[in-house]
Amino acid sequence: MLSGRRLLAAQDTRPPSVYAGNIIIEGLGGPEMDGGALSAAALADVRASGLSAAHLTVGEVGGMAPLAAFEKIVRSIASWEAEIDRHPEVLMRVRAATDIAAAKRAGRTGLIYGLQDGVAFEDDLDRLSALHQLGIRVIQPTYNRRNLLGDGCMEPADAGLSRTGIEAIERLNATGILVDLSHCGRRTAADAIAASKRPVAFTHSGCAAVAEHPRHRTDAELRAVAESGGVVGIFIMPYLARGKQPTAADVIAHIEHALRIAGSEHVSIGTDGYISPTRLTPEFIEKFREITRGRKAAGIAAPDETEEGYLFASDLNTPRRFETLGELLLARGHSADTVAKVLGGNLLRVFGAAWQPLQARPA
């Protein structure tokens, strides 16, 4: 039997876990602001999460004039920048892939700004340069509905990208912003993959072969994004379970299907939720109902959005849900290398490839 001292020494020499020893990236999600600021509880959850970086949305979606949308983005970024400055021991700003590695080393969480709709620049693509200067690093050309760039996944016509939309993809490539196609219609996504000279991503989606839904991607789309060098991120939404509140098993089923079709180099996780666990208080339930009704009234809701279809998995309702998913994947026989890629390595590679300005690349 080992003595206490020898036992401690043996424990100290064990390699770190897949979760602790690697970069972990939330492909879509982040801290939740309360009244324009992060609470002490939210900050504690960020620190507890162990996330190296999180891609969060800083703009509105649909139903807004372009300049009004642009103004909201600027105000939102200003709020997040102020939070980073107030809490440098917890948060970092991310402008390059190397910043994510720096956040990991410092034990902090880097924040990556992204947009889920191109409405803020649909009438003036020159605004993309300003958005990049403000820190935007991920952009979806469309949300669920149509805009001047192309069709979202809820448009029955599925008309694809407009000529302006194709030019927007070219501008995103040249500027160094990742093209995210999560809410795009099938043809819009195909057009964007064909037009892009950089890897593209579905940062938060599911697999249509496991559960058919407009927000999920077909096997052909999974293969196409893999061939671009990009990634497909699996979210935690009721759509995974055909409208029911999802479980960890549902998330794993979609991750494993994506791994079979796209390969271990091209799968990630983007929960589409907050880092903090959800508490089903009466206030939360009423607020969720109001948001759901508002989305339906605005025409931006997707099928299976209900007032009881909460956007979290009860058995993953913790700041360290990525760790739980990693352990479940390991238990099912996936290698530590594959799990490390899914938890963050693949997104780190894609960010590095997408964010370097095209004109700066060597000939």
Image: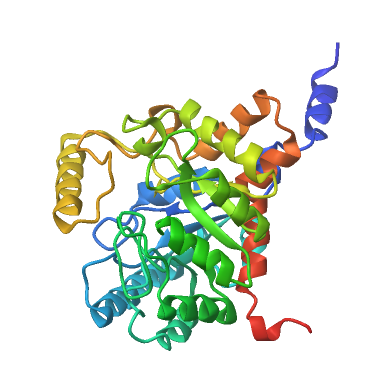
Going 57% across and 62% down the picture, which residue do you hit? 200
Color style of the picture: rainbow
Q: Residue at x 75, y 41 (%)?
A: 337
Q: Is residue 28 left or right of residue 108?
A: left
Residue 28 visible in the snapshot: yes
Name the foreground residue: 15 vs 113: 113
| Corner quadrant of residue 146 | bottom left
Nearest to the observer: residue 361 or residue 222: 222
Q: Position of residue 309 (x, y in %)?
A: 27, 35
Q: Is residue 280 left or right of residue 277?
A: left
> Which quadrant: the N terminus?
top right
Quadrant containing the C terminus in the rendered view: bottom right
**Please, is residue 224 above or below residue 324 in the view?**
below
Considering only vertical position in the picture, is 111 above or below 75? above
Vertical order, 15 against 186 (above or below): above
Which of the pair 192/353 is nearer the observer?
192
Residue toward you, 113 or 294? 294
